[in-house]
Image (cartoon, grey):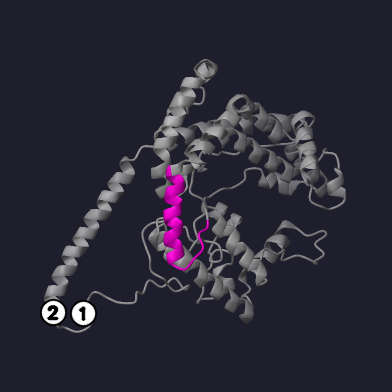
């Protein structure tokens, strides 16, 4: 595990700790489900239907057009009402309100963005001071143009709203249809069009102000620069790492304990990050240590409710009538991942068996770009075509039967709200120090 990877891993874990409790409360709302559909479609994403309402010839054209106009207006009015309802919907969370989180899932992104930019700038300035103390130049990176709460890279299926009727008809669950690039699958199947990281960064206009200085350094100085910025690996070599095997639960716990109790950051960026973020992170951790298990039990009670069980049984029966076995939330992904593995289309390392010692970043980048642009062989394309058709048909059936988080949310919300109110009452004195503690301000 190299230093840069370890640093990124710490940042990811830390941010997870920071937002884990928020995720628990808003998960049921934040995840999108499926819309209303029920038609089987081609894996190519065609929207053609089995029949048309309009006349192919000229007979009755005026009447058909008038009816189409009326129906179209009615559809537009209905869609507008749905949009209005969606915009008016406010997620109710008594516990979230008590802790200072906004009730509205559509929180103030502008305010949150400004706060993140200010904290990022503080971290960059601390890192710059640290680097100068070690004899290097470092210009703080301006993050004011960075979108901390964007919707991800454009491309692939993201030109359609995830889980919408259009998305389901074209991408299914987004597993087999988003595994390979469009170049790899050719024009007749569905692939992704994700730009690479450098392309995305270039489109955003990002320029590293330190790049010219980095390029001016000789290789040994450059290595020392990155060691100072990102740190050096100082973790022990655990047995499972030396033996190149998966760790046991006890071994994973041993490593987690080491990071929690003994690990000390060595890179300027990580040291600065801890200084800026650790106060908030410690507060969240303190809350989680005291109430995490109780909150987990509370939401397990929501999951175990008779109302939710009845709803899922109804959806399962409907899906069965459509000719498919019912799969719960994350199971479609695992189902089609396994099917991809079975036909030799699972995840693979394009550089397996290649001697990459001494490769530059540009060589690695080129190798992966070449891999993404090489079309799959005919037998794999045929196997993928069958899987994409199966996935889309299954997703359309699930869609028709009302599977998805937004439907379950209607069942879960009233139960969860009552349990949160009871939780606040039962733990009133212990919760008092945390009232408003996690607001956006």
Q: Looking at the image, can residue 403 be seen?
A: no
Element on which disc 2 rests? loop
Residue 374, x across and y down, in percent: 63, 73
Magenta region includes residue 311: yes
> Which residue is at a point 61% across and 34% down the rendered structure image?
17
Quarter of the image for residue 275 reads top right
Q: Nearer the viewer, residue 135 or 348?
A: 348
Left or right of residue 207, residue 165 in this image: left
User: Mark 1 or mark 2: which comes first in sequence?
Assistant: 1
Residue under numbered circle 2: 60
Q: Is residue 335 above or below residue 59?
A: above
Quarter of the image for residue 198 reads bottom right
Magenta region includes residue 109: no
Residue 45, x across and y down, in percent: 44, 70
Residue 242, x across and y down, in percent: 87, 49
Mark 1–mark 2 Cα distance, whole angstroms, equals 8 Å
> Which residue is at a point 42% across and 28% down the rendered structure image?
94
Q: Is residue 243 above or below residue 349?
A: above
Q: Nearer the viewer, residue 284 or 159?
A: 284
Residue span colored magenta = 307-327
> Which residue is at a point 48% across and 49% down the rendered structure image?
151
**Label 2: few (<14), some (14–19) or many (≥20) C-alpha neighbours in 10 Å:** few
**Label 1: few (<14), some (14–19) or many (≥20) C-alpha neighbours in 10 Å:** few
Residue 209, x across and y down, in percent: 62, 43
> Which residue is at a point 64% across and 41% down the rendered structure image?
12
Residue under numbered circle 1: 55
Q: Looking at the image, can residue 268 be seen?
A: yes
Q: Are marks 1 and 2 in contact (CB under 8 Å)?
A: yes
């Amino acid at each position: 595990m190299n230093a840069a990877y370890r640093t990124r891993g710490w940042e990811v874990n830390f941010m997870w700790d920071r937002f884990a409790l928020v995720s628990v409360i808003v998960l049921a709302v934040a995840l999108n489900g499926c819309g209303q559909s029920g038609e089987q479609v081609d894996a190519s994403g065609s929207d053609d239907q089995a029949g048309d309402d309009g006349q192919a010839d000229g007979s009755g054209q005026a009447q058909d057009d008038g009816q189409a106009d009326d129906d179209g207006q009615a559809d537009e009015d209905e869609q507008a009402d749905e949009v209005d309802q969606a915009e008016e919907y406010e997620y109710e969370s008594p516990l979230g309100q008590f802790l200072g989180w906004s009730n509205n899932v559509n929180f103030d992104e502008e305010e949150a963005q400004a706060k993140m930019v200010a904290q990022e700038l503080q971290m960059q300035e601390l890192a710059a001071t640290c680097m100068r103390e070690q004899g290097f130049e470092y210009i703080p990176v301006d993050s004011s143009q960075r979108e901390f709460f964007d919707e991800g890279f454009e491309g692939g299926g993201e030109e359609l709203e995830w889980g919408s009727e259009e998305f389901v008809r074209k991408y299914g669950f987004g597993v087999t249809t988003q595994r390979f690039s469009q170049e790899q699958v050719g024009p007749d199947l569905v692939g992704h069009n994700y730009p690479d990281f450098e392309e995305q960064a270039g489109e955003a206009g990002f320029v590293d102000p330190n790049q010219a200085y980095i390029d001016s350094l000789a290789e040994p100085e450059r290595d020392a620069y990155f060691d100072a910025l990102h740190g050096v690996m100082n973790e022990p070599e655990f047995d499972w790492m030396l033996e190149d095997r998966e760790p046991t639960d006890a071994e994973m716990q041993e490593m987690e304990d080491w990071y929690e109790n003994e690990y000390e950051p060595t890179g300027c960026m990580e040291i600065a990050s801890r200084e800026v973020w650790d106060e908030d992170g410690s507060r969240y951790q303190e809350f989680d240590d005291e109430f995490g298990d109780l909150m987990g039990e509370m939401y397990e009670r929501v999951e175990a409710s008779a109302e939710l069980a009845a709803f899922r049984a109804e959806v399962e029966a409907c899906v069965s009538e459509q000719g498919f076995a019912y799969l719960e939330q994350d199971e479609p992904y695992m189902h089609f991942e396994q099917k991809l593995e079975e036909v030799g289309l699972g995840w693979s390392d394009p550089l397996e068996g290649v001697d990459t010692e001494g490769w530059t970043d540009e060589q690695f980048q080129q190798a992966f770009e070449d891999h993404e642009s090489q079309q799959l062989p005919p037998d794999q394309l045929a196997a993928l075509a069958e899987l994409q058709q199966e996935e889309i048909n299954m997703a359309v059936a699930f869609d028709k039967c009302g599977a998805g988080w937004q439907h379950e949310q209607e069942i879960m919300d009233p139960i969860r709200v009552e349990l949160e109110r009871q939780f606040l009452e039962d733990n009133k004195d212990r919760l008092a120090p945390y009232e408003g503690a996690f607001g956006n301000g």
